[in-house]
Amino acid sequence: MWNSKTVLVTGGASFIGSHLVDKLLANKAIVVVADDFSSGRLENLEYPLKRVKGKAIWTADNLTVHQGDLKERTFTRPLMRDIDVVFHLAALHGGRGYIHTHPADCCTNMLLDQLVFEEAHKAEVDRICFASSACVYPSYLQEDEGSDYLLKEEDAHPFVRDKAFADLEYGWAKLMGEMALKAYHRQYGMKTSAVRIFTAYGPRENETHAIIAFIAKAFVQMDPYEIWGTGEQDRNFTYVEDIVDAMMLAAEKIQDGSPINAGRDDRITINEAVNLVFNIMGWNPKKIHHDLSKPTGVASRAADLTQARKVLGFEPKISYREGFDRTIKWYTSTRKREDVKKHLQHLLMER
């Protein structure tokens, strides 16, 4: 599937995008990255990149990186030439604190998505895989602490009453992106897929997301240690390697724009996740403070993987402990304690 294919990864210098680039290159693809570096970092692409003189372009074997704004047609259109597959991950996004405080920024994702889809169609790109989100699901299905309900793909639909009820502006933008992809398939026959990503975490992620935030607070030995909300809200934290596997499988096996879940069907509470971080890092605070004034999101979230198993043959492989351990090793080896301590409150809210 991927050998010698030319693949554009928008947001390819970001957290998930850079891991996807790694796997595509390992599978012999020729990869083009487009990123504005608003949250992505060139350093996430761990290759011997050389800058093209006078241009915001970097190259290495089978990898080209372009810096620019995908909302600008003059940047996006040339990128689509001779592309076989587009993985569209670029978005203004962040953890709960970010999307809660930056609603207007999140709305710009609708403009970004439509321009990418339109230019891909005009350039006759064979297929698009869109990074959607669990935020497309109605919050009323996720209100009960301790719930065992698993979110099914049919629980969110832009044309069904009570199922078009996404989580904040970010969730609505993702749901509209899914709707547009199905429209491009229906009208033009473009091969499209949408992967609903559930609470991804891992190396290269930033502190606005939960697991990195927990690690950062323990790294600077915050005491009292602050947890947003009661800590009894739960999530199915999914390691980035598993997310990338699901995205590549979706691009291979889904053509009609049908959304598919990428996550886990088991879950842990925030308190349990924090305690696992303490255990791995070998440190415990004397006191924990639960800040009920901070945004916490839904009470309970996990994915039904019935369709992912049936259609993709997908199964998450990385356990919570292994994923947390890998992420902690990355974070503590790439950060300086004093720098994190100095900027922590800003890092928790800004990309």
Image (cartoon, helix red, strand yellow):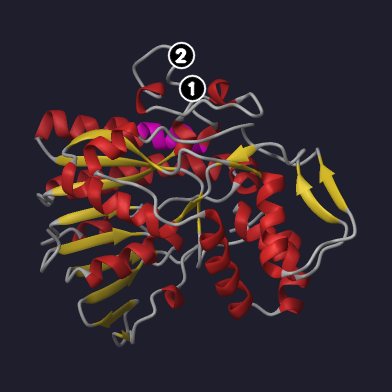
* Mark 2 residue crowding within 10 angstroms, few (<14) / some (14–19) / many (20+): few
Mark 2 lies on a secondary structure that is loop
Q: Is residue 212 above or below residue 100?
A: below
Q: Which residues are magenta?
A: 170-176
* Whole-percent x, y for residue 279 in the image: 70, 62
Residue drawn 67% across and 63% down? Answer: 215
Residue type, label 1: Phe
Which residue is farthest top? 161
Residue 246 visible to an observer of this rendering: yes
Residue type, label 2: Asp
Q: Relative to the observer, which residue lies in front, 114 or 198? A: 198
Q: Kindly identify which numbered label has been placed on residue 173.
A: none
Q: Is residue 138 above or below residue 19?
A: above
* Whole-percent x, y for residue 42 in the image: 43, 75
**Prevailing secondary structure of the magenta residues:** helix
Q: Relative to the observer, which residue lies in front, 114 or 153? A: 153
Query: Which residue is under mark 1?
Result: 165
